Image: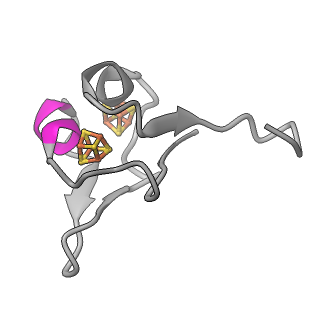
Amino acid sequence: MYFIDKSICTQCGECAASCPFESIVEQEDGSFVIDAHICTECGECQLNCPFEAICEKDENKESA
Ligand code: SF4
Ligand code: SF4
């Protein structure tokens, strides 16, 4: 699954604009969150984040 590293994210909004499924939603505090229920894991947002703030988490691994 994909997630946004808030320590890197500048809240530019590029990812939300690039997601073909509108699964990245802006929160009230201005941060962006990926809705895992809608996300198809297409990877488009990761490619479009200018700051490499979107990471892919392997749920089968505890580290990394
Ligand atoms: S991986 Fe694809 S569907 Fe999921 S949030 Fe990123 S752009 Fe949207
Ligand atoms: S494109 Fe990257 S830096 Fe911009 S809001 Fe999305 S995760 Fe944050």
Q: Main secondary structure of the magenta part?
A: helix
Q: Which is more toward the observer, 47 or 8? A: 8
Query: Where, quadrant-wise, is the N terminus in this rendering?
Result: top right
Specify the farthest residue to the left: 17
Q: Quadrant of residue 40?
A: top left
User: In the rendered view, does 44 fall on the left or right side of 42?
Assistant: left
Q: Residue at x 16, y 30 (%)?
A: 18
Q: How is the image coloured?
A: one colour
Q: Is residue 5 above or below residue 1?
A: below
Q: Which is more toward the observer, 43 or 6? A: 6
Q: In this view, does 36 lie above or below 27?
A: above
Q: Give the range drawn in magenta.
A: 14-18
Q: Residue at x 40, y 22 (%)?
A: 42
Q: Position of residue 58 (x, y in %)?
A: 73, 34
Q: Residue at x 25, y 28 (%)?
A: 50
Q: Quick check: is 36 in the magenta stretch?
A: no
Query: Where, quadrant-wise, is the C terminus in this rendering?
Result: top right
Q: Quick check: is 15 in the magenta stretch?
A: yes
